[in-house]
């Protein structure tokens, strides 16, 4: 819930960087408790979760690849 408070919990986003936003994880946290089970909104929230998982997985994989490459380079192999 700290994500909701820190991001400002704004449901409508703007292109201005100084205004509040709502992150994907905050959207899931704020809306999942009140959504109708099986509705399109429900499925979109789970799709958002899948997107978050995929982005996190890809970023972690890229980070591991970079660390491995740097480790090989520093070891002199």
Image (spheres, rainbow, N blue to C red):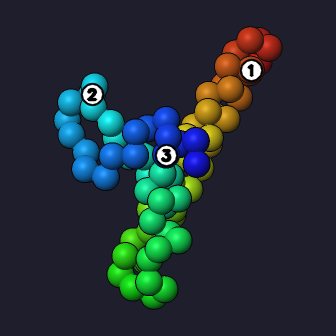
Question: Cβ–Cβ below 8 Å for labels 2 and 1?
Answer: no
Separation of residues labelled 2 and 1 (CA atoms)? 37 Å
Residue 15: x and y in percent read 20, 35
Please name whichever residue, 8 or 53, is drawn nearer the observer in this view of the structure.
8
N-term mark: 2 or 3: 3
Apparent side of residue 49 relative to residue 14 in the rendered image (left or right)? right
Residue 46 visible to an observer of this rendering? no
Q: Total marks drawn?
A: 3
- The residue that disc 1 covers is 71
Please name whichever residue, 42 or 34, is drawn nearer the observer in this view of the structure.
34
Disc nearest the viewer among 2 and 3? 3
Residue appearing at x 53%, y 71% in the figure: 33
Whether 19 is drawn above or below 33: the answer is: above
Residue appearing at x 44%, y 83% in the figure: 36
Separation of residues labelled 3 and 1 (CA atoms)? 38 Å
Residue 9: x and y in percent read 40, 46
Apparent side of residue 72 relative to residue 62 in the rendered image (left or right)? right
Residue appearing at x 68%, y 26% in the figure: 67
Residue 17 has which mark? 2
Q: Secondary structure at mark 1?
A: helix
Residue furthest to the right: 75
Question: Cβ–Cβ below 8 Å for labels 2 and 3?
Answer: no
Please identify the quarter of the rendering in which residue 69 is found.
Answer: top right
Residue furthest to the bottom: 38
- The residue that disc 3 covers is 4
Which quarter of the image is occupied by the C terminus?
A: top right
Whether 47 is drawn above or below 9: the answer is: below
Whether 70 is drawn above or below 21: the answer is: above
Disc nearest the viewer among 3 and 1? 3
Q: Sort mark 2 into few (<14), some (14-19) or many (20+) by Cα contacts within 10 Å.
A: few
Residue 64: x and y in percent read 67, 35
Apparent side of residue 5 relative to residue 18 in the rendered image (left or right)? right
């Amino acid at each position: 819930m700290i994500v909701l408070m820190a991001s400002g919990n704004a449901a409508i986003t703007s292109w201005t960087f100084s205004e509040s936003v709502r992150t994907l994880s905050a959207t899931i946290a704020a809306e999942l408790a009140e959504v109708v089970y099986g509705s399109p909104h429900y499925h979109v929230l789970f799709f958002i979760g899948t997107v978050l998982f995929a982005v996190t997985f890809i970023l972690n994989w890229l980070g591991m690849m970079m660390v491995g490459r740097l480790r090989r380079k520093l070891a002199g192999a």
